[in-house]
Image: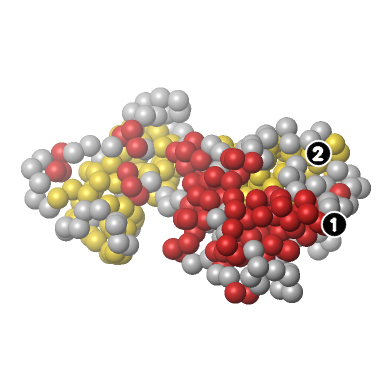
């Protein structure tokens, strides 16, 4: 393992925030995304790993070496900050070569390596320019090249795309993933952007109130969250309280829902999870619509046009069902396939 957190705890003096008993590994070549609400401990994790703070309990290892007492500059980590942190008085090429200069690499060699790194991020033509003359996306590429030019043991990405326009984020996500895979370097991505985390990461860690709630592959995290907190935070979710009536039926305020409940006890309280894209609009007047499994008729109370899809809310009594679809006609009822229903701890 390149990075290992073993029962790491850090609490701030005011008792607010920090981390509590966090353990995980990051393998060489793996990209781990860390997500969580504001104040959950994401930034604390990054600061502890980078060496800006030391854990109060537990152990952090990089390539098997305990980092206790090791200064940030000696941890051999490449870091890309949200603000890019490029030196304005240096050219792009000088910025990239600077980490090599600090390590005593001869001038000719460091600039040769800097040019190669610049070429790898698609900016071979920009070496003589000042950072201020570059776009945000170009500056982010320079920051990435600078972080990797000296072949660090691991790469830390701190909200790397948050300052970019939405149109650039997809392009930069793909570029960062490609370069990270090519470099075969262990990477931790701290982000508030769930789409960024799910699309880029091999695994995603969800942190909440300083604790690690779930660490899983993106698809497993989305499809099989461990509890209501993870389900509500990762993506959009319909969440209703219910009670198991039989191995294939759960009662809810919406009405009974047919689903697989065989692994639950009859009478047990559960939370029902249905993702919006699993809600199917039923065309008004469709034959046998009301005999469909898990069919609910209601009033359309919110309809949001999002381009390729729409997100709508149907009120069924005092309950809301949120759906997402490319269908643009009238929605007065919906159905939910039993296999799309997940049951979670209440």
Q: Is residue 320 above or below residue 286?
A: below
Between label 2 and label 1, give the one nearer the viewer.
1
Marks 2/1 in contact by CB < 8 Å: the verdict is: no
Residue located 89% across and 47% down the image: 70
Image quadrant occupied by the N terminus: top right
Image position, residue 67 (x, y; %): 86, 43
Residue located 49% across and 36% down the image: 220
The foreground one among 180 and 216 is 180
> Can residue 3 be seen by looking at this rendering?
yes
The foreground one among 305 and 116 is 116
Q: Is residue 304 above or below residue 324?
A: below
Quadrant for residue 102, please give it. Answer: bottom right
**Mark on residue 102?**
1
How many numbered callouts? 2
> Can residue 21 be seen by looking at this rendering?
no
Q: Secondary structure at mark 1?
A: helix
**Is 156 left, or right, of 108 in this rendering?**
left
Residue located 41% across and 42% down the image: 272
Image position, residue 217 (x, y; %): 53, 37
**Is 222 left, or right, of 324 in this rendering?**
right
Q: CA distance from mark 2 to mark 1?
A: 24 Å
Q: Secondary structure at mark 2?
A: strand
Image position, residue 172 (x, y; %): 52, 56
Image position, residue 243 (x, y; %): 41, 38
**Mark on residue 61?**
2
The foreground one among 322 and 157 is 157
Instruction: Using a 10 Å C-alpha cutoff, classify the residue at mark 2 as few (fewer than 14 neighbours), some (14 to 19) or many (20 or more).
Output: some
Instruction: Using a 10 Å C-alpha cutoff, classify the residue at mark 1 as few (fewer than 14 neighbours), some (14 to 19) or many (20 or more).
Output: few
**Mark on residue 152?**
none
**N-term-proximal mark, 2 vs 1:** 2
């Amino acid at each position: 393992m390149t990075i290992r957190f073993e029962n790491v705890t850090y609490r701030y003096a005011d008792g607010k925030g920090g981390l509590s008993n966090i353990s995980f590994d990051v393998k060489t070549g793996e990209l781990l995304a860390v997500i969580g609400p504001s104040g959950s401990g994401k930034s604390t994790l990054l600061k502890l790993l980078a060496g800006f703070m030391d854990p109060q309990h537990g152990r952090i290892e990089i390539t098997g070496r305990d980092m206790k007492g090791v200064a940030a500059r000696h941890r051999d980590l490449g870091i890309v900050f949200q603000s890019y942190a490029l030196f304005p008085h240096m050219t792009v090429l000088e910025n990239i070569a600077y980490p090599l200069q600090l390590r005593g690499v001869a001038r000719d060699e460091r600039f040769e390596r800097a040019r190669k790194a610049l070429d790898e991020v698609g900016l071979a033509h920009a070496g003589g320019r000042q950072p201020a003359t570059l776009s945000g996306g170009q500056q982010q590429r320079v920051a990435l090249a600078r972080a990797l030019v000296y072949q660090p043991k691991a790469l830390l990405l701190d909200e790397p795309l948050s300052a970019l326009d939405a149109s650039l984020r997809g392009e930069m996500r793909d570029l960062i993933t490609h370069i990270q895979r090519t470099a075969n370097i262990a990477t931790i991505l701290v982000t508030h952007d769930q789409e960024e985390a799910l699309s880029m990461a091999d695994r995603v860690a969800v942190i909440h109130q300083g604790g690690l709630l779930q660490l899983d592959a993106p698809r497993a995290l989305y499809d099989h969250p461990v509890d209501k907190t993870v389900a509500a935070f990762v993506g959009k979710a319909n969440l209703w309280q219910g009670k198991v009536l039989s191995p294939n039926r759960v009662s809810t305020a919406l009405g009974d829902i047919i689903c697989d409940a065989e692994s639950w006890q009859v009478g047990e309280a559960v939370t029902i999870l249905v993702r919006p894209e699993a809600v199917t609009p039923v065309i008004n007047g469709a034959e046998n619509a009301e005999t469909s499994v898990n069919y609910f008729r209601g009033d359309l109370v919110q309809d949001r046009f999002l381009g390729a899809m729409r997100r709508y809310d149907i009120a069924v009594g005092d309950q809301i069902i949120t759906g997402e679809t490319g269908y643009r006609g009238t929605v007065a009822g919906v159905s939910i396939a039993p296999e799309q229903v997940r049951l979670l701890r209440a």
